[in-house]
Amino acid sequence: MTRLTRRAFHQLGLGAALVSTASGRAFAQAPEIVIGAANPMSGVFAFAGVEGFEGGRDHFEFVNRAGGVAGRRIRYVNEDSGYRVDNAVAIFTRITSQHQTPVFFGDSTGFQKAINPELNRRGTTVMGGASFASEIDNAQAFPNQWIPGPNYSDQMRVLLRYIAAQKKGASVVLVHSDTEFGRDPIAAAEAEAKRLELNVVEKIVTQPGSVDVSGDVLKIRRRNPDYVIFHGYVLQPIPEFMAQARQAGMTSRFMGTFYSTDTVLMNRAGAAADGYMGVSCYNFDATARGVQVEAIRAANVGKTRTHAYYQGWTNAMLAIEVLRRTLAANEELTAVNMMKHARALKNYDTGGIFGVPVSMVNNSFPHGRVYQYSAADKMLKPASDWITITAGA
Amino acid sequence: MAVEFIDIVETSLAGIGTGSLMALTGVAFVIIYKATKVINLAIGEMLMIGAFVFYGFSAGLALPIWASVPLTLVVAALIGGLIERTMIRPLLKDNPVSVFMVTIGLTSVLIGVVELVWSAEPRRLPEFLPSQPVLLGDAFIPSKTAYSFVIAAAAMAVLITVFAFWRGGIALRATATDRAAASSVGIDVPGVFSFSWMLAAVVAALAGILVGSVGGISSAMGLFGLSVFVVVIVGGLDSILGALIAGLFIGWLEAMVGRFMGGEFKLLATFTILLVVLVVRPYGLFGTHEIERL
Amino acid sequence: MRVGTAKQSYAADEGLFKTDTQKVWFGLLLAALVLFPLNGSSYWMFLAVLVMINVISTTGLNILTGYTGQVSLGHAAFMAVGAYTVAFFDGRFGTPVLLNLVLAGAVAAGIGYLVGLPSLRIKGLYLAIATLAAAVILGFIFLNWTPVTGGLRGLNVPTATIAGIELATPDRLYWLVMPITVVMVLAAKNLFRTRVGRAFIAIRDRDISAEIIGISLFKYKLMSFAISSFYAGVAGGLWAYLFRVVTPESFPALASIFFLAAVIVGGAGTIVGGIFGAVFMTLIPEFLKLSATALVPWFPDASIYLAPVRNIIFGLLIIGFLIFEPMGLAEMWRRTRRYFALWPFRT
Amino acid sequence: MSPSDSAAPVRPPAARLDVENLSLQFGGVKALDGIDLHVEPGSITALIGPNGAGKTSAFNAISGFYRPKTGTVKLDGVDITQVPARDRAKLGLARTFQNIALFRGMTVLDNIKLGRHAHLTSGVFGAFLYWGRTRREEMELRAEIERDVIDFLELDHIRNVPVAILPYGLQKKVELARALAMRPRILMLDEPVAGMNREETEDMARAILDVRDEWGVTVLLVEHDMGMVMDISDHVCVLNFGRRIAAGSPTEVRNDPDVIKAYLGGSGDPRKAALDGAAMGEVA
Amino acid sequence: MATTGDLILEVNNIEVVYAKAIQALRGLSLAVPKGKIVALLGSNGAGKSTVLKAVSALLPMENGLVTEGRISFDGETVEQSAPHKLVRRGLFHVMEGRRIFGDLTVEENLTAATYALTGRSGITPDFDIVYRYFPRLAERRKSIAGYLSGGEQQMLAIGRALVAKPRVILLDEPSLGLAPLLVEEIFGIIARINAEEGVSMLLVEQNASVALSIAHYGYIMETGRIVIDGPTEKLVADRDVQEFYLGLAHKSYRDIKHYKRRKRWLS
């Protein structure tokens, strides 16, 4: 009995090995341009990774249908990083060793920081990523990377400026997770609040993976702040937090940054998420006009797409734009050349993805807008105008 | 900032509420440990799969609560039995570290299964607990905390009563004391093993439904098991009473630390307690001290 | 049974390699390691470096868990200590690479020694949980001791530079990591030819009788913790030079389980088992990923659906080995060798 | 060259052991109650008694595994009661166990080498390099063990076999070999022939006598096999219920009425007594 | 000694191996006739307990395996049976060292033994029979069993067997660690149970004299095989038995000759 099953077990292993070796064959090299990506298709960030991947994929299909970039088709090579730095580095190394890869999409702050010295050393690949980390928004330290939107600190600034415009001297509570991601913009947010004469009455740090918010609700119930801003969550505790806060008689408004504002997840949360406000640089307005937003709608009939999808799409769009400009200038696809054209993006029309023409400042596009979720319509509705963060203003 | 008395009371009550869920999951852990001497690192994931099965019935198939809960518990029992039969029993005679490692592998398998079927996205369970907050004097208790505490307490009361008066409880305790001797008096020991895993899976699933209803569900919710681990070590691996008391205590401690020191200190506090207990009383506060002889 | 290769002296019988065949195999392995970079793929070089780092770390855990019988769930935290040490010294003082690596090992060994202290009172799985607690506490220190660890941002690591040559790519780093790996694995093998290694095994097999024959449990358990952490520290240091950034999230708790799984899948208590385990566990996810990629032409969404499948297979591998092949790959390797040794005359 | 052609083994002098008023308790149950025991240097002394009489407890207290409640243990007149077990090994106290306590995962040779652990000095750095002093020490150890122990006990054919797969009798012998490798001055054997057949018992008895004669070691043993004990010991001490009930030469002990009673129980016939009792019970 | 039809238990030429390597029994046979007490004697480690565990199918729990031979209980083979099913068929093993459930009370221990009645219709648990044979247990029925004295624990162990209403009881070293008087008392009760309840017994003992005093038939084993057997009267009269097992004179171990030592080589 044991021997038989052991044999079966070995055969299983053999089978897996055969499948593996049969793979990995490089496809015929056409004059394609390969764009690589490590996306977290599994793990806690899979919800964003899958959307982000599909956003990129759909954009490249859209470009390829229109004949590609300067007649060259785009080949998008994506692998699952599982949101782990070493996996992502391995993926980067493999894809770039198998193909010339002028552009690569990173999956996380950790990875983008880890790979940065290598990017700078190589000078052959530029990177757009899923990270909005303030640290990466630094053209000196990260000369070959861009952020497809405002960094987390700027996202906070957008929210705080909106608050300041709504109510002078409003009280604010910051709730963030105890991760690198979660702590990123807190210091900047406090400074901005001080400048705007807002009153940060409490900062709450939660353990990653912690699901019970009742203690935290209690913590701020008696203060009943005007606004509560979440950062560093993949939505999970937010609807519950709101529901419990409502039960507790609080009248605060709840807000969040990019990944904490996800349409699909909020649709699932339903009524509990009603009224939640989030910052985004992307145009979720159903009536928005532009080539790109219309292409998105065409590719997603009957589907609601999230931030992450727009972020994937935007990264792809920026990549294509950079490639187009570099090739049009008849220059080699080196990092220096590509980033030169990237940094030359001033008042660039994003085809409706951003509501305003955008300019690259440092490595990011510091534009944003506050949306409010309507449970009845199952969508995010604009709550503010486009706000552009400029230094010192 | 002055600490108000009412603040302490409210935080304590909320902590005890969470603690009751840790205690319930801890009881599931202890049932397995008592009967099979297996340290089940996958207890958090068993809780998770219970919560997702409930999600499948209540949200996926849109069944009413009164049908979803029993169905979930039945499915959980089957899963528990399946795990015991296929992964645990073949190794029971081997050294305990092997079985422990199997439960680590099981962790990975269960997370994979959940992500395969439901994806890794966090989800919310349908609301089924009353949403009126509970007021104890001036102290405010969030409704879900209050009701899940009541349900967890009731479940534990039922379990304790059953173990005290039902003959099967004696069989379980006899098996825990001495497998060979239990076998020699006619107790179906493999049956007891299966039963204990099934029962533990049911208890864990119930805890999962409650934990999920409070904080939503995701493939990462097995992390809850980490705190449960601390609970059972502090209480004593083989003591149901220990799991109860330590569960409430750890829940309370986490709430107090979170409230007055900040959330980043929660794990530090619990694991420091864990370390202290391990060094001072390696068998836990209520666990059985096994005398080692030559 | 192998037909006798009679030996003339005890020295030959006590040798590192007991037969000529073993020496030949080892020579071939060294040659393969030297020639490997000829494959020219930087991806393979990256993987090779990663595999060897994992081999060092797994060998360290094997010394503690496989040979001394003390289960540790905090091994990755010691790697993190090593990585931070390298990042700190190289980044702050620009000290030489080899010194940094020795420091990485030494600091990790020191902390390992401290973490081992509870092992004198608690055993088995309780000890495993104590190491888990230690890892959590170390993680808290990494996150909050900002002046040294860079807090949540972590530290950047300069390129490893030896004699003016920058080892910036895996292709070059290979020539640093490979010799270190060979030396450390051989050192571990040597360890178990002497009284120290025997004392470890004695403690694993039966700690009470070890004490009776005069082995100080106190000394040797802690020594095992320290040596194991030293290996982890050096591996972590090399890891830092490979990834060039160290953050509190670089070494999650899951990584400790990865190494434990590598020890088990490879075969606990054999040096070759640690190597097999590290190689296998590092490459399996890569192979699975390749499989998923291969399926894309037929199932465009394969990479989405196969991601959780990878988790499942990972878990099933651990379970499968424990149930069907508890002695691990090392035992399968031994059987294979025996089979071929007798090959035309099957038994 | 043959490994056994070297000088005679190192022979430390035999030790004297004195145990006085030794008591031991397990959670309220008295395992030993004021035992006295005197073992002459170079003698074979046996500790006997029915199951549960406290023989093994006495052994464990003497070898330092249990801390006695009262009493002293003296080795050559030096009080070692407070010396931890592992340090007693260095003083020349070696023992075997009732349930074989070999290291099952290791070979016979490694098990025996471990016996000498406390006498070796090389440290961890030497071990990594396996060079210089460490290498020399290991080589000397090997040569010495081959000559003094493996040859002496005729274990050469199994030296590279893992102990776990050896038959019981051989395991017992390997344990003796390991104890000898400790260069004992007093050798404590816990049931050395338990479970052996006549032939194996003879072999072991011979080995014990040889060890005493050739190594000049004091031997203290616990044994059930009365026949063997009475034959090979110089002195016998009988325990029952944690007390010493007799001590003296084998002949003296054999004829002691208390000993006969302890071993044979009462003189009556339980079946008959029981049936009588039952009959009486029915009447009453 | 008897025809097969009269045998409740028959062990035929069995071999037992532990951990796939250590052979514990080598071709051992014995038989227990209905209604009789059979004693199995031998020194420590001779394999007596192994025989009982092989019969009651508890061997696999200790990583042992019957590799050869056949064991039949009441004409049916037992090898493939789960131990608890054997108990329910009426074969009860009172294990060495008593193995009572120390955390449970006396009564709960007896309740646990009622699992032996599962599937046997028409039998109701009867604790009174236990208290009748062992009145001392009746007084302590609510006590935690772990706090009983050694003798009381042995009584409880036998009491559990009584609750199970077996047809054969395997008794492993009931005298272990008990004072002589108590041994006599307990053996007396064992003999009574045999006589009054008609239960057959296979009794393993180191204390040969007390065992032979109540047994009808005896086997003596050494290192895994039977060396002598016969009705008790015959055994007690046997010189070898007197010599080796009842502690009387024999040829001295001092006189065994030395084997000549050879020079040896490494292999």
Image (tube, rainbow, N blue to C red):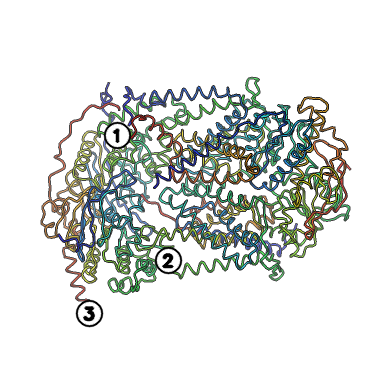
Q: Which sits in the foreground, D54 or B286?
A: B286
Per the model, the C-alpha gap separating discs 1 and 2 is: 49 Å
Res. C277 in view: yes
| Residue A295 sits in quarter | top right
Host chain of mark 2? B
A117 left or right of D164 in image: right
Amino acid carrying label 1: it is Ile
Toward the bottom, the furthest residue is D284
Q: Which sits in the foreground, C156 or C242?
A: C242
**Tag 3 secondary structure:** loop
Host chain of mark 1? D
Residue C19 position within the rendered picture, expressed as x and y whole percent measured from the top left: 38, 25
**Disc 2 packing (10 Å; few <14; some 14–19; many ≥20):** many
Residue underneath mark 1: D158
Residue underneath mark 2: B170
Q: Which sits in the foreground, D16 or E81?
A: E81
**Tag 1 secondary structure:** helix
Label pair 3/2, CB-CB below 8 angstroms: no
**Disc 1 packing (10 Å; few <14; some 14–19; many ≥20):** some
Label pair 1/2, CB-CB below 8 angstroms: no
Whether A283 is drawn above or below A65: the answer is below
Q: Which numbered marker is on residue C183?
A: none
Residue underneath mark 3: D284
Amino acid carrying label 3: it is Ala
Per the model, the C-alpha gap separating discs 1 and 3 is: 67 Å
The residue lying at 73 percent from left, 46 percent from top is A183
